[in-house]
Amino acid sequence: MKSVLITGGAGFIGSNLIRFLIDKYKDYRIINYDSLTYAGNLSNLEKISNKNYFFVKGDICDYSLVKKTFEKYKIDTVIHLAAESHVDRSIKDPLSFAQTNIIGTINLLEIARTFWGKDFLNKVFYHISTDEVYGSLGKKGYFSETSSYDPHSPYSASKASSDHFVRSYKDSYALPVLISNCSNNYGPYQFPEKIIPLVINNIINKAPIPIYGKGDNIRDWLYVEDHIRAIDLILHKGLIGETYLIGASNEWKNIDLVKYLILETDKLLDREKGFSDKLITYIKDRPGHDIRYGIDASKLKNNLGWKPLFSFEKGIIETINWYLLNNKWLKNVASGEYRDYYKEHYF
Ligand code: NAD
Ligand code: DAU
């Protein structure tokens, strides 16, 4: 039986990953280790009832609890997702990003190395990272596994640092590691501080839709389930020590993305065409705002046979419908601390 420690399993990608793995690998023991920050929510995992699933509430920086968890569950596989993940928050509070994303990652690496001793057979430490470590593209070109690191926000700098530490453990201790750097994800259970759920939420509530700068920045969007399938493939078929970039070649200018969301959400809400256009509000740009991300995923496609299954049209409809059907979830997570963050950030 594989014993898989998933850090950050109560967040957006982590909860989608856990549901997928539990469904596909009935004999895997899955340990969700999460400190439940504002972004972690056990209601993301409400419907799971499986005797091989365990939840541990803890901080990845807590050496003794992580160590105990390794010992108790005899962890042989780590999929490390826990992170502070929102760029705007990192600009306000860089230290907590350094703490979780850098120190937390080193803590996990160190415990994996010492707990596994010299016997790395059938062990793997899989680090989930982001394309933002590569910085910003101009009009042409794509990020690939050989692109130079050039992070611009405290978030991306902390993720870049964590990637370097993971590689240093491969080189210095032969720790069996895998890294993937993925483009922007969207889909169910994403916290509504990120642009897609934020826009859907604001359309539902007829609230202003904040667009940074002129809305010209470009992101490469991937449906979360396609990211999960890539993680599954890399975990089981990836070459130890390698890095894989994940992306669906689906680039959208922010303003076009917002207009598309308005079109589709208004339709599903039975509102007349263009009803929510008036909500679009241009605001001050994000400092250090990366212009464009674009992924060349040919290594993952050619070597491991991955391809995205969701067209953007299909993924977006699934996503909007999910948020409309799960309005209670949306209202819950968008209350409390989030309301204060929102007021402070935008007004
Ligand atoms: P998220 O913010 O939705 O979830 C992060 C989870 O980590 C939460 O459950 C939170 O409670 C937990 N966490 C935070 N600090 C912790 C700590 N100190 N100890 C234990 N748990 C802690 O993030 P997400 O969007 O699901 O992203 C998951 C991972 O994927 C991150 O590492 C992120 O950098 C990476 N990633 C995200 C995207 C994206 O578009 N969302 C794209 C590429 C890579
Ligand atoms: O590329 C992968 C990264 O994608 C992940 O590593 C991060 O965890 C994830 O948060 C995401 O980062 P971005 O900064 O690209 O995502 P965000 O949803 O915050 O913003 C997407 C684009 O929309 C970006 O150009 C900024 C813009 N934006 C965002 C918000 C929240 C706005 O114009 N208005 C907004 O209110």
Image (spheres, grey):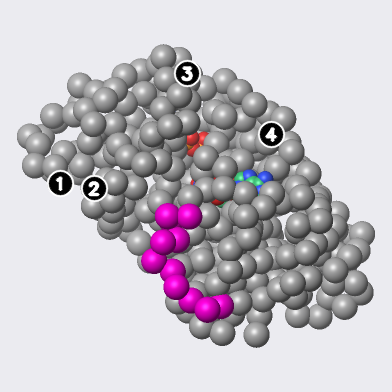
Q: Earlier in the sequence, mark 1 or mark 2?
A: 1
Q: Quadrant of residue 148?
A: top right
How many residues crowd around disc 1 within 10 Å: few (fewer than 14), some, or many (20 or more)?
few
Q: Are marks 1 and 2 in contact (CB under 8 Å)?
A: yes
Q: Amino acid at mark 1?
A: Leu
Question: Which residue is depicted at the point 30% across and 37% down?
Answer: 201
Badge 1 is on which residue?
268
Badge 2 is on which residue?
324
- Which mark's residue is nearer the viewer, 1 or 4? 4
Question: Which residue is depicted at the point 57% across and 29% down?
Answer: 89
Badge 4 is on which residue?
96
Q: Earlier in the sequence, mark 4 or mark 2?
A: 4
Q: Nearer the viewer, residue 138 or 269?
A: 269
Asked whether mark 2 and ligand 2 are closer than 8 Å, the reply comes as: no
The Cα–Cα distance between marks 1 and 2, rounded to whole angstroms, is: 9 Å
Q: Earlier in the sequence, mark 3 or mark 2?
A: 2
Q: Secondary structure at mark 3?
A: helix
- Which mark's residue is nearer the viewer, 1 or 3? 3
Badge 3 is on which residue?
344
- The percent position of residue 73, horizontal first and vertical second, equals 71, 73
- What range of the chain is rendered magenta? 42-52
Q: Earlier in the sequence, mark 1 or mark 4?
A: 4
